[in-house]
Image (cartoon, rainbow, N blue to C red):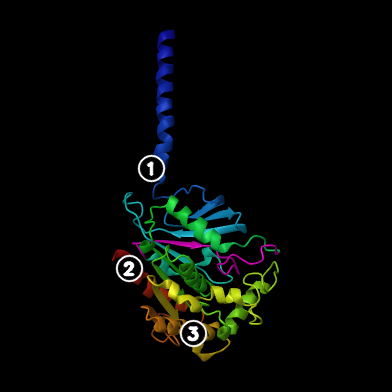
Amino acid sequence: MTRTSSRWRMVVALMAAVVGMALPAGSAQAAEGTEPPRMTDGFGLTQVDTTVGGPTNFYITVTTPEVSGKHHIKIILPSGYYDDPARRYPVLYFLHGSPDDPIQQNYPALTTSNEMITVIPDGGARGWYANWLNQRTAAGAQNWENFHLKQVIPFIDANLRTIAAKKARAVAGVSMGGFGALHYAQVRPDLFGQTASLSGDIDLSVRSMDLRMAVVASLVGYSPGVDSDAAFGSPYPVFNADWRFNEVDPAAHMDKLAGVGVSIYVGNGRGDATDLEFWVESASKHVKDSMDALRMPYHYVDYGDGAGWGTNCNGGHNAWCWEADLQDLIPRLERSFAS
């Protein structure tokens, strides 16, 4: 009895050891494609809270010394992402407007592509995709450019099956995010093969003072309050005090996008000066004029009052028109990535 019991205990122990070793692998295999992939911290990003969503459409929450607070990063994977573990994908970085958040970017067009990964990082209610001039406001650290270009992009490349190359990376955005998209591609043309502005604030020159004032209004209009010069300094062209606005003005630096595909989408706000689209149409035209002067290739769509441009688009500064823009942009990005 003693020898049999001893052997039985050895068999049970061996089985338990085998099961114990097999369970984690089995669990991971079972989870593959049934829940979001596990992401590893790095590049200054620390994940907090719980990942929310399904296997191909989810968001994580991170903290970073570069920007105060917690920040969402929404990720949309192709439906076949888990089918071929060897396949890698190009990436679209989609930048939201003010005062939005990544988890509110629910454009149906963003979920249609089986050819690319879409990443929507937090840009803050008024981050302006910039490293702020004043880091000592009540808002705390505000180095959005560092967060996105030096942390989010390498973090995504390290955790997902991306093609980590300029030709396979695009940046696009709406409104404030349209500014961010062109600005980032101008700052790092080595990172992005394509950039697109959807109703973007892409002319911050003196001729577009209304858009400069929109920047100022967003800075002082949200809590916690910060001074109007916190991001780019003074907006007023007195003794060159506005030089930082001129430095980041996309319209003034389109030459930096040589070798980058550029797409511009805009409406006319139905001619209503109370609709921001009325002002960004003028900004987009200034960018077009700059590209024409430089003899640059580009894709430019001014859909006016929105007639015939997607369902419910009325030419205004709104999500209906941006959904129509994305329905046109995404297939074009796919073709560019595949070429």
Report the mark closest to the observer, 3 or 1. Answer: 3
Query: In this image, 151 relative to 259: left or right?
Result: right
Residue 281 numbered mark, or none = 3
Q: In 3D space, how far apart are the residues under numbered discs 3 and 1 (Cα atoms)?
A: 50 Å
**Amino acid type of the residue tagged 2 in the rendering:** Ser
Q: Is residue 314 visible?
A: no
Residue 336 numbered mark, or none = 2
Mark 2 nearby-residue class (10 Å; few <14, some 14–19, many ≥20): some
Report the residue at 68% width, 68% height from top: 223
Q: Is residue 229 magenta?
A: no
Is 205 above or below relative to 95? below
Report the residue at 49% width, 73% height from top: 178
Report the mark closest to the observer, 2 or 1. Answer: 2
Of residue 316 and residue 157, the one placed in the foreground of this image is 157
User: What's drawn in magenta, residue-wise?
Assistant: 113-137
State which quadrant residue 65 falls in: bottom right
Is 290 above or below relative to 338? below
Query: In this image, 129 relative to 170: left or right?
Result: right
Which quadrant is the N terminus positioned in?
A: top left
The residue to which callout 1 is attached is 29
Q: Is residue 130 magenta?
A: yes
Mark before the other along the chain sequence, 3 or 1:
1
